[in-house]
Every structure is written in structure tokens, then in C-alpha cells.
Image (tube, helix red, strand yellow):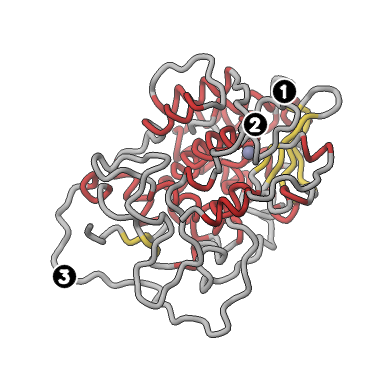
Amino acid sequence: MLDHSRSASASPRRTVSPLARSLCALAATVALLLGGTAPAPAAAPLTIPVHRTESGPPDYRTPTSILKGLPFAPTNINLFNPAIYPAARDYAPASKRMTDRQILKTLKSSLVHRLGTKKTARAYKLLDNKTLKKVVPDLSLRASVVNLTGTVMEPTIRHYLDGTFSSYTIGPVPGGIFENSIAVAGEAPDGTRFAVLNQKYRQEDFRLLTPITGHEALHSGNIPGANPVTAAKEELVANTIDSEVYLQLLLENPRLARGKTELAQRLNSKAMARINTRDDRTGELRLFESEGTVYPVSTKGQAASAALDSFGAAFDLSGNLFDTPGSTVLDKVLTRLTGTKVRGADFDDETIALLDRDSTHLTPRQLLTVAKEALLLDAGRKS
Ligand SMILES: [Zn+2]
């Protein structure tokens, strides 16, 4: 069942440039989770009902009992990656960028919704912070940084302000294992860090970029030879945490999932895998447990090209992997996420075990709201 993720990491020994070697990215190991290159559409496309009409008696189950059930399948596969559902529409990256005015207006309303008016004023001021402007000159990217305020990844903003990162820009990403990356981060010769958003996503809604911006800032250090394959533990931790941010953004604004862009499809697919990775005893989110593939189908005629056992199964943890160093920022993020004071955390088995126990602060009802109203998943199937 793990074929795809294993095959993705079965050839990690490709030659990569020294630069690429020092990078950490949302990349090939997680190709299935984040959506790799889409395969060519099948010669005879399947007929797929876009919406499934529920019938029968009303469902009186509690949110928790529903979450104890089977993985939720899409009712609209076009929200998800064609690499997973071959009949899904193959959306391109966004082709029209918001105007500066739209960015400012959208950021403000996003913050007001989350923080209220008073706290928004303070957060919004950060857009004009001199250091942040220098490190993140692009307004859309800078809005994605500010939009982390009030999320579990808010502490990562510090890395864009305190000299840890010297630049976060838009540009080309290296080839090889980084080819399909949404963004990469690495270490500059002077010891500072930098991050680059893949330029094909330069026109995307900054709200979609928000979890990615937090993810890259969380990568706090390099060790020789570390890359997304050898540092799979770091990637699993960072991806688990950034998923929580995306779930929160979808809870606040379910329509964000319907952007009809390649990036939205990739993020939605990952969010579906996250919501479907839960145990059948408590219905709580886990990292490695599910009652079936986390990419299920709900109707005859639908097909998924790949199965994935769990969110965590997209990361090959079987090899000779690095534990990589955390930071006080990681501690703070984990403390926010779990509600337990965390100190001295690294990207290691202990942190993975912590996240396996507790990786969401969304209630069962909120998780179901995201599943049904944002991702349009069918949460009505009974086990
Ligand atoms: Zn990463």
C-alpha cells in the first residue's frame, strides 16, 4: 500500500548539486502527499458524479463517532490532485495575481476574522516592518508571513525578523529531487538562511502560501547530507504542523479550498490525508493509523490512482535517517499545537510521537466542518 511513497524515495541517490544538497524542501519524498507530476489523463475518462446526494434517514451520530468511522471520500474530486484522482481537472497554477490593494484588504479581513479589530491593528503593522520588508520584499509573500499571526505557526514569524533568514523570495527551485517543490529553504554562505517560493506559484493567493511560509521558517538548521529524503523526520514534523495551519484557514474560510488552482489541489489533497488519518477508537487524528487508504473513493466509477495508508506513510522513515536539530521556535509551535509545554524539541522520534498523540487543536466538530464544508468530503459513510 505504500508503493508510491516508497518508490518516490527508492532512488534518493541521484546526483544533486551542493546547493541542492543543503536544501530542505516540500519535495519528492512527499510527492504523493503533495501531489507529484500529474499522469496523462486516461484514454477513456470515467464518468464521475460531482456531488453525491445523500438519502436515507438523518445522521444523528456525534462528531466523534463519525470521526471513528471510515476515511472520508471526495464528493468533488476536482478539488484534489489529478496525480491521485486521474479524472480530476488538471488545474494550472494561478495566472492572475491579486492587486496590492486586494492583498491588503484580504489580509485585513482574514486577520480581523481571526484576531478581532484590536489585535489586527498590531499584526497588520508588521507588513511595514523595515526588517521584514528587506527580508521579504514581495508584498504577497510578506502578507503570507503576517497571516501566520494567530495560527499555531505564529512563532515562526520570528525567524524572518531576527536575522535567522536573510531572504524569502520568489524564483526558480533546483531540479532533481526539488523539481516539484512548492518552496525550498537552505543555508547561505554567510550562515544565514534563505527560502525561495517556486516561481510557478508566484500568482497564488497569499493565504494558500501561509502554511508554506511557516513550514520553511521551521526548518532551522542544516547538517551535511540532509535533504528531504534523509531528513524525512523533519519533513513529517513540519508537514504535520503546516497542515494544522491550513485546516485552521479552511475553518475560517471554507471557500479557500475552491481556488481551482494546482496549488489548492495539492494542499487540499494533503489536508484530506491529514483528516483521514485517525484511529477508530477515539476518532482523534494520528500520524500512522487509518481504516483504509486516506485517498478513498465514494462512488462507483471514481478511481484513485494511488493508495496511501496514512499521512505519515508518505514519509519513508525506514532508512538511515537523520534526527535534525529543533529551535526555540519549534518548541513554541509545538507548545501551541499540543497545549503542553515543550522544551528542547528536535525533529526526532520523540517529537513525532508527541504529534502522533496530539496534533490538532481543532475540535471534532471543527474537523468535520472543514471536511464537509471546505473539502466537500463525504462524512456520511458508516463503517
Ligand atoms: Zn520542508
Report crowding for label 3: few under 14, some 14 to 19, many 20 or more residues within 10 A (C-alpha).
few
To which residue does mark 3 refer?
Answer: 56
Q: Nearer the viewer, residue 206 or 313?
A: 313
Q: Would residue 191 appear left or right of 350 to someone viewing this image?
A: right
Indicate which disc residue 164 carries: 1
Q: What residue appears at the point 54 percent right and 62 percent down from the top-left corner?
A: 81
Q: First in sequence, mark 3 or 2: give its number.
A: 3
Q: Secondary structure at mark 2?
A: helix
Q: What residue appears at the point 32 percent right and 72 percent down from the top-left corner?
A: 52
Q: CA distance from mark 3 to mark 2?
A: 48 Å
Tell me, yes or no, whether the two marked residues, 2 and 1, touch with CB atoms within 8 Å: yes
**In which quadrant of this rendering is ligand 1 seen?**
top right
Identity, as a three-letter code, of the amino acid under mark 3: Gly
Identity, as a three-letter code, of the amino acid under mark 1: Thr
Indicate which disc residue 217 carries: 2
Q: First in sequence, mark 2 or 1: give its number.
A: 1
User: Does any atom of ligand 1 lie closer than 8 Å to the CB of label 1?
Assistant: no
Q: What residue appears at the point 69 percent right and 46 percent down from the top-left corner?
A: 12
Residue furthest out toward the bottom? 44
Q: Secondary structure at mark 1?
A: loop
Identity, as a three-letter code, of the amino acid under mark 2: Ala
Q: Nearer the viewer, residue 338 or 229?
A: 229
